[in-house]
Amino acid sequence: MDNIIVETGTALYPIYFTDDFSGLAEAAEKCGYKGRKLCVISDGNVAPIYVKTVTNELSKVFSDVKVCVFDAGEKSKNLDTIRKFYDFLLENKFDRKSVIAALGGGVAGDMAGFAAATFMRGIDFIQIPTSLLAQVDSSVGGKVGVDYGVYKNVVGAFYQPQFVYINTATMDTLPEREFSAGMAEVIKYGIIQSEEFYNYISENREKIKALDKDALKYIIRACCDMKACVVGRDEHDTGEREVLNYGHTIGHAVEGLKEFELLHGECVSIGMSAVLNISVNRGYISAEKAGEIRELLRYFSLPTTVSGLEADAVYEQLFHDKKVNSNKLKFVIADSVGSTIRTSDISKDEVMEAIGTVLED
């Protein structure tokens, strides 16, 4: 299997890239899991499609495999669901040597990882992401957690998986809306890290949208490679890793205020569209280039505006963002395609204008 190694200050683990689940047993055996107990945590959409194949493969290594299924969707990403996971683990006599596997999208990965980080003060977990967003972003880097009310990811931890297993063939069963949501994160990587990668997405948009196998493998691996490099240099999000939150500050505010009716990637798209306004006003990016980026987002059926919200409410929600320091907002702004700056030197007027550009009456 092709792989990338993620190396942080606390962990060293592989991301495997393949097009089926046949290598799962080998990956688990390399971790020394022979004879241990495994809990596969998945949601009600993914489990019926993949859980049988995955558990059959992992049963070659683990002595006992249990499956815990939760209701799909961001509205399940809370402490009540985590409590159900703890109950399941205790009822089935899981212990400190047991392992959790996250099978699904970003919600499954974040919650299964948080359960693993906190159960028995921490047990091993593995990521088996099946959505584009999870494969290119959330499964890598060890951010785990839950939402608290309308506040996105404010309860969580940094807890690295033992490995990430990416089967790119799962894109064949991914709903179109979920695929589009993942493309927001893919486009984000081009804007923040690589103009060459951004140009690849733009030039190959038709292939990507048509789920061309080679194009998908390329963008997924490229995003993981970029994220692994950033996480390796800043595991705990105290500096450079903040660039990965491009579009997320306003995006998270929208996501919470809309009570998670919009998908995470859709809100990131709206957030990126908003902060492009700041880049244009500061002379970093031309209005033409900003328009081109928004058009690319819309090509992948992503929203660049949102209705039903008030600018003041969005602004106040921003202060619950995890990057806020001493009550000062911090933004990631593109100073060119492929490059960003992180700054707290941003006025309320700038932020309000940016918010205003994405609000519909």
Image (tube, grey):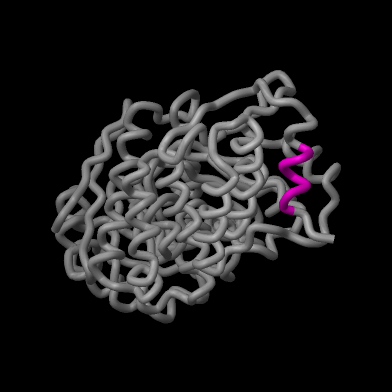
Q: Residue at x 43, y 34 (%)?
A: 339
Q: Residue 268, image x and y in percent?
A: 58, 52
Point 45% across, 44% down: residue: 191
User: If the image is split into quadrants, where does the N terminus sit?
Assistant: bottom left
Query: Main SS type for the magenta part?
Result: helix
Q: Which residues are magenta?
A: 352-358
Q: Between residue 57 and residue 275, name the one nearer to us.
A: 275
Q: Is residue 147 visible?
A: yes
The answer to which of 35 and 161 lies nearer the viewer is 161
Picture quadrant of residue 279: top right
Q: Nearer the viewer, residue 263 or 123?
A: 263
Task: Please say if 214 is above or below 116.
Answer: below
| Residue 328, horizontal then vertical, whole percent | 71, 23
Q: Residue at x 25, y 75 (%)?
A: 56
Q: How many numbered discs sit on the rendered protein?
A: 0
Q: Position of residue 276 (x, y in %)?
A: 60, 43
Comparing 171 with 115, the one in front is 171
> Is 299 covered by the magenta stretch?
no
- Residue 280: give x, y in percent of width and height: 61, 38
**Apparent side of residue 73 relative to residue 22 in the rendered image (left or right):** right
Position of 86 compared to 328: left or right?
left
**Which of the 4 image quarters holds residue 307?**
bottom right
- The residue located at (29%, 73%) in the rendering is 212
**Quadrant location, the C terminus:** bottom right
Question: Is residue 40 among what the camera can see?
Answer: no
Q: Is residue 353 magenta?
A: yes
